[in-house]
Image (tube, helix red, strand yellow):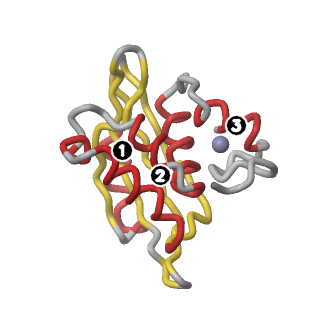
Amino acid sequence: MAKTAGACPCGSGEPYARCCRPLHAGGVAPTALALMRSRFAAFARGDGAYLWRTLHPAHPLRARPEADVVRELSRAHRTLRYQRLTVHDHDEEGERARVLFTAHVFERGRDRSFTELSEFERVDAEWRYRDGLTASEPEATITAFLERLS
Ligand SMILES: [Zn+2]
């Protein structure tokens, strides 16, 4: 696990201790956007258990053994550098929400950044990551995704 001092990996500008750490420590995200940011921070820190906990029960990864998925998600940060998160837009309606973002990710210097339209759904009053449409050509697809959001 990475250290807890310093700026939050989600890029909010807040210290980690006051930003995503309370959620990683067991708190409930007040909004889908907060959950999305905390999941990015969890990827950056290699917190696979949190990533598992915030998956919607119907997410495909939930069909696999928890221990395997947690191990894989926890390892991702060893080869991938989660450098920066840009949130383009988001909306929330009742029990469902969507967030459009670009994750700036690098693998040994190679740009693995992607843009995703994430879908979230509340389960037992907690936001969970349901699904996402990703694209590896951010500039070309942001406009198309934004049209889906409006
Ligand atoms: Zn944060």
Residue 71's x, y, as percent?
Answer: 40, 56
Say which of 63 and 132 sits in front: 63
On the image, the x and y values in percent for residue 88 come to: 51, 49
Helix, strand or loop for disc 1: strand
Q: Residue at x 73, y 43 (%)?
A: 16
- The secondary structure type at the circle numbered 2 is strand
Work out whether residue 49 or residue 37 is closer to the camera in this orientation and state it: 49
At which x and y percent is residue 50? 48, 40
For ligand 1, tell me if the residue under mark 3 lies within 8 Å.
yes
What residue did someone put label 1 on?
A: 118
The residue at the point 43 percent across, 41 percent down is: 99
Mark 3 burial class by Cα count in 10 Å: few <14, some 14-19, many 20+: many
**115 and 5: which is toward the camera:** 5
Q: Is residue 115 left or right of residue 58?
A: right
- The residue at the point 46 percent across, 49 percent down is 48
Q: For the C terminus, give its image quadrant.
A: top left
Q: Nearer the viewer, mark 3 or mark 1?
A: 3
Q: Which residue is mark 2?
A: 101
Label 3 and label 1: CA atoms lie apart by 21 Å
View quadrant of ligand 1: top right
Label pair 3/1, CB-CB below 8 angstroms? no
Which comes sooner in the sequence, label 2 or label 1? 2
Amino acid carrying mark 1 in the image: Ser
- Residue highlighted by disc 3: 19
Residue shown at the point (75%, 48%) measured from the top left: 4
Q: Position of residue 29 (x, y in %)?
A: 54, 26
Query: Crowdedness of circle 2 by 10 Å Cα count: few (<14), some, many (20+)?
Result: many
Q: Earlier in the sequence, mark 3 or mark 1?
A: 3
Asked whether disc 2 touches disc 1, contact meaning CB atoms under 8 Å apart, the reply is yes
Label 1: few (<14), some or many (≥20) within 10 Å? many
Horizontal placement of 137 versus 48: left or right?
Answer: left
Query: Label 3 near label 2: C-beta < 8 Å?
Result: no
